[in-house]
């Protein structure tokens, strides 16, 4: 039976960060790098490390926090969309594993991969699942165990990444002025070669050669990606402002993907926003890929810094390239 079409809104948030930490001194102890270089070039001071278990083991506590805050059980969830580049295994999907672990016996679900933009892509898809009337309670999870695909002999990449998970609950909302208002997502495949993980897929299945050649790790031409990420994130943010007639005063929070503090600052500057209006936690967690946006939302909500009616702009940039923005009027 077709239900009436409604706006979708985020109605709860949760996150999880594993307790173990690699600080910059850890890298100084065995690599030709320094705390000063890492702080100045990236803004990162430390990152979390999941010592045991897989991505689903971080997603589960993030979801539990999200459901507890909303006061509902896992059995009420109808669909679980998991944004990740580090699934526990290629199949079954991490969504499927999570469905079993949390006891969401009435939910179906799937994984979605768009590198650092995975969560924003997943949020867009889940928004349509609510707006279409197909579902009334959809979980969107952003979770990555980046330490599983990080080459700790490569100083260009290993200082950048960390592990973590965040989750949001989407439900229909009566008030049309609130909720998930707009998305503008892009893919530019011409630059895929600058940020990728070569082996482990169908093109280069695991072999002694791929392991010996260290092809199961993130490979990045950092400078080239940086040069694209700065205008890419800023263009995405400007597009959100233009499409929704937003001035800087209309925006309470910019929620940028946390890849590099310099990229974040450049985006805020182009938007005419002071850094006080920008969610930044890269110094504590590094780049957690699919998890950066939902961790920010959950941490800021927890501190009482997200209020009903707040204008929130999300922007991301990642491998693919994948990039884009989203505009939310915070609903609870
Ligand atoms: N410690 C010390 N020196 C280093 C380190 C390090 N950890 N890493 C690199 N260097 C050196 C380089 O070798 C280079 O040395 P050289 O001049 O002798 O050749 C010098 O520092 C400068 O290197 P650059 O790569 O030009 O440094 P840059 O200032 O560009 O910073 C960084 C590198 C941090 C990777 C930056 O380019 C960046 O943030 N890129 C974008 C990352 C991003 O947004 N990725 C997309 C999301 S991730 C995803 O989708 C999975």
Image: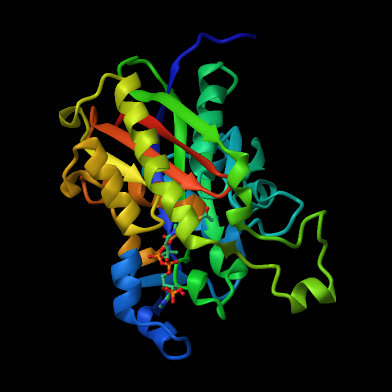
> In the image, what residue occupies the spot 71% across and 61% down?
198
* Quadrant of the image occupied by residue 17: bottom left
Scheme by which the image is coloured: rainbow
- Please provide percent x and percent y for residue 44: 34, 68
| Viewer-nearest residue: 236 or 170 | 236
Task: Report whether 13 appears left or right of 303.
Answer: right
Task: Report whether 32 appears left or right of 319.
Answer: left
Name the quadrant where ligand 1 sits.
bottom left
Quadrant where the N terminus is found in the figure:
top right
Q: Which residue is at the far bottom? A: 29
> In the image, what residue occupies the spot 42% across and 54% down?
15
Is residue 13 positioned above or below 328 on the image? below
Is residue 10 positioned above or below 29 on the image? above
* Quadrant of the image occupied by residue 53: bottom right
The answer to whether residue 73 shows anywhere in this view is no
* Quadrant of the image occupied by residue 168: top left
| Viewer-nearest residue: 142 or 42 | 42
Task: Report whether 206 appears left or right of 254.
Answer: right
- Please provide percent x and percent y for residue 96: 69, 47
> In the image, what residue occupies the spot 56% across and 10% down?
3
- Please provide percent x and percent y for residue 247: 20, 26
- Please provide percent x and percent y for residue 89: 72, 59
* Count of numbered circles on the image: 0
> In the image, what residue occupies the spot 60% across and 64% down?
218
The answer to whether residue 66 shows anywhere in this view is yes
Quadrant where the C terminus is found in the figure:
top left
């Amino acid at each position: 039976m077709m239900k009436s079409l409604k706006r979708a809104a985020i109605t709860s948030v949760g996150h999880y960060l594993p307790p173990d930490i690699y600080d910059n001194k850890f890298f100084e102890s065995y690599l030709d790098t320094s705390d000063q270089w890492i702080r100045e070039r990236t803004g990162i001071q430390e990152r979390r490390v999941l010592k045991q278990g897989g991505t689903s083991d971080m997603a589960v506590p993030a979801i539990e926090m999200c459901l507890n805050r909303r006061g509902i059980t896992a059995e009420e969830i109808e669909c679980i969309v998991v944004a990740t580049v580090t699934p526990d295994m290629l199949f079954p999907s991490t969504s499927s594993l999570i469905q079993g672990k949390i006891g969401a016996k009435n939910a179906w679900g799937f994984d979605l991969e768009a590198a650092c933009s995975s969560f924003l892509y997943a949020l867009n898809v889940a928004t349509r699942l609510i707006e279409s009337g197909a579902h009334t309670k959809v979980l969107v999870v952003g979770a990555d165990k980046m330490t599983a695909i990080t080459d700790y002999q490569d100083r260009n990449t290993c200082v950048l990444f960390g592990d973590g998970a965040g989750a949001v609950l989407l439900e229909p909302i009566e008030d049309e002025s609130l909720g998930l208002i707009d998305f503008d997502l892009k893919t530019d495949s011409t630059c895929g070669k600058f940020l990728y993980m070569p082996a482990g897929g169908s093109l280069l299945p695991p072999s002694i050669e791929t392991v010996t050649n260290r092809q199961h790790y993130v490979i990045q031409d950092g400078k080239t990606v940086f040069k694209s990420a700065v205008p890419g994130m800023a263009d995405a943010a400007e597009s959100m402002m233009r499409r929704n007639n937003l001035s800087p005063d209309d925006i309470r929070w910019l929620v940028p993907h946390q890849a590099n503090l310099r990229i974040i600052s450049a985006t805020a500057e182009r938007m005419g926003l002071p850094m006080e209006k920008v969610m930044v936690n890269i110094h504590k967690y590094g780049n957690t890929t699919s998890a950066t946006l939902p961790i920010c939302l959950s941490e800021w909500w927890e501190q009482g810094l997200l209020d009903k009616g707040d204008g929130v702009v999300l922007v991301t940039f990642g491998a693919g390239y994948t990039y884009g923005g989203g505009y939310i009027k915070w609903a609870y």
